[in-house]
Amino acid sequence: MLRVSTRLPRALHPGAWWLWALAMAAAAGRTTNPLLLSLILVVAGYVVVRRRGRAPWAATFRMYVYLGVFVVVMRVLWRMVFGGGAGEHVLFVLPEITLPEAAAGIRLLGPVTAEELLGGLYDGLRLATMLICLGAANSLADPRRMLKAVPAALYQISTAVVVALSVAPQLMESVLRVRRARRLRGGRQRGLRALRGIVVPVLADAMDRSLALASAMDSRGYGRLGDTPRRTRLLTGVLVIAGLCGVCVGVYGLLDGTRHVFGLPMAVAGLLVAGAGFLVAGRRIRRSVYRPDRWLLPETLVVLSGLTAAAVLTVTAGIDPSNLYPSLSPLSWPAVTLPPVLGILAGVAPAWLAPPPEVRA
């Protein structure tokens, strides 16, 4: 069964790609070691290159890489401006700006140390890696199939989420369409000179698509109250919102890894409360799905590969965190051991275990 499913081209269940990407992001959140973070980036990029299709959203991964580079640069610049000169190894000295007494304790510019720059680089690289992992899911998973796969009780909420997740792919598709049109018309401007001729048509195209989507949703009855009693709607809303808030806090705690009380316990409590709300809401919603996506063995293996990477780094952080967090005082070269490397390499398994994407003429 596995042999047939992995060889025949088909779209993997979008939930599997998102669970794999969230697990890889959780693994990245457990370390600031640039060597391990770089390995996670290589794994995510290789899986995207091997398993992305030709859909418009598949081209968004490059945009997330650019966004990640921007995050790293901004994080380093922030440490240079507000670093405070902590550390012993001064690299260069910027002219310090004297602030008024109301801003006592804040130091603007001045000596820039290697410890501050490396601290900003490590933090920025961790944030960028988590962001790029989520970008990998956005490049691999079809947002429309994701909307079809969610439970009936989550349909209206997930519609808003899927629309939000579709913003980046739509912008990338608009950019490619505008650039293609400029080339056909003989446009030769590049770089910043071409930015003005691209931004305005892209924004206009995004606005037209938003209006078309709003009209389509309104014509299909989204946002209408129906015959659900007011008390039921209020109970459902309170349970779902409270549960989702708990899940968000729990996920933040899992990714941050510094406060265990806000991690798994809060996530489980949020899921239970939200599940109760979904059960209440799902009793009054009837929805048919044409050809639902099946969850087969490749989907399970893809999720397990990501969970393996997250679990190995979580266990390593609890046993010996020295290799996951390089020392800045005193400065030391980042070192790695074999277990976290093998755990991260387990995340590259979807490059072979996931079925190849469908190629449409």
Image (cartoon, rainbow, N blue to C red):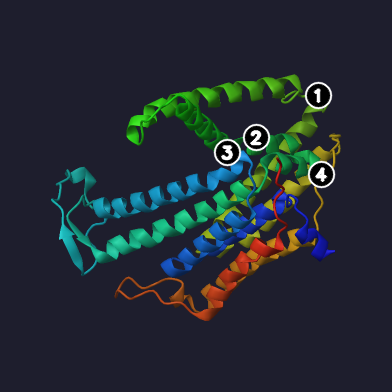
Measured in 3D between alpha carbons, the distance from the residue under mark 1 to the one under mark 3, in whole angstroms, is: 33 Å
Disc 2 + disc 3, Cβ < 8 Å: no
Q: Which residue is mark 3?
A: 169
Q: Nearer the viewer, mark 2 or mark 4?
A: 2
Q: Is residue 239 visible?
A: no
Helix or strand or loop: what does disc 1 sit on?
loop
**Amino acid type, mark 1:** Gly
Q: Nearer the viewer, residue 23 or 69?
A: 69
Q: Which residue is mark 2?
A: 160
Q: Nearer the viewer, mark 2 or mark 3?
A: 3
* Residue in view at x 34 percent, y 62 percent: 119
Q: Earlier in the sequence, mark 4 or mark 3?
A: 3
**Residue 297: x %, y % from top left:** 79, 62
**Amino acid type, mark 2:** Ala
Disc 4 + disc 1, Cβ < 8 Å: no
Q: Earlier in the sequence, mark 1 or mark 3?
A: 3
* Residue in view at x 65 percent, y 25 percent: 213
**Amino acid type, mark 3:** Pro
On the rendered structure, is 65 left or right of 221? Answer: left
On the rendered structure, is 266 left or right of 85? Answer: right
Q: Which residue is mark 1?
A: 226
Q: Which mark is residue 279?
A: 4
**Residue 358: x %, y % from top left:** 72, 48
Is 208 situated above or below 143? above
* Residue in view at x 50 percent, y 33 percent: 175
Measured in 3D between alpha carbons, the distance from the residue under mark 1 to the one under mark 2, in whole angstroms, is: 19 Å
